[in-house]
Amino acid sequence: MAVAGHADLIAERVVQLGGVAEGAVPVLAQRSRLSPYPLRIDSGVDHVRALAGSLAAFAAKMRCSISEGEQAVDPVTVDILTEVSPDIEKLLWLGEAHAQTRR
């Protein structure tokens, strides 16, 4: 499933649990727990490193959320997050691999 499909899947689960899925960019920017993306990057490698850092933080939060779902005995949410997690981990792996430079 594409990453955009993951966002829809998670939003649908939020609604099923009685929440409101607010996906507008200003709302996401305001509520994100990720560090703001640096705006003054001037090299491709630095962009890849910044993206890899954001993906690492997101992957760590995803792993925590899976554990929290297990503790709350919410198998459906755990299944959804477990489905999404490998794609995030793969993007992280690719980003970290591309961020390495030869010295």
Image (tube, rainbow, N blue to C red):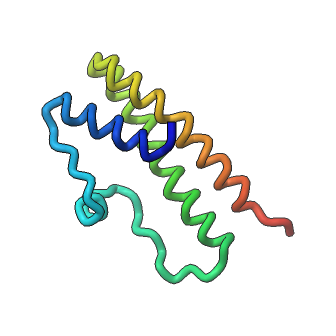
Coordinates of residue 67 in the picture (x, y in percent): 39, 27
* Picture residue at 55% right of the left edge, 39% below the top: 87
**Residue 25 sits in quarter:** bottom left
Coordinates of residue 59 in the picture (x, y in percent): 49, 43
- Considering only vertical position in the picture, is 78 above or below 28? above
Coordinates of residue 48 in the picture (x, y in percent): 62, 64
Coordinates of residue 81 in the picture (x, y in percent): 41, 31
* Picture residue at 68% right of the left edge, 70% below the top: 45
- Considering only vertical position in the picture, is 64 above or below 36? above
**Residue 65 sits in quarter:** top left
Give the total of numbered labels: 0
* Picture residue at 45% right of the left edge, 69% below the top: 37
* Picture residue at 67% right of the left edge, 54% below the top: 96
Q: 51 or 26: which is nearer to us?
A: 26
- Considering only vertical position in the picture, is 52 above or below 81? below
Question: Which quadrant holds the C terminus?
Answer: bottom right
- Considering only vertical position in the picture, is 21 above or below 41? above
Asked if residue 3 lies left or right of residue 91, the reply is: left
Q: 30 or 12: which is nearer to us?
A: 12
**Residue 41 sits in quarter:** bottom right
Q: Which residue of the protein is positioned furthest toward the left in this rendering?
A: 18
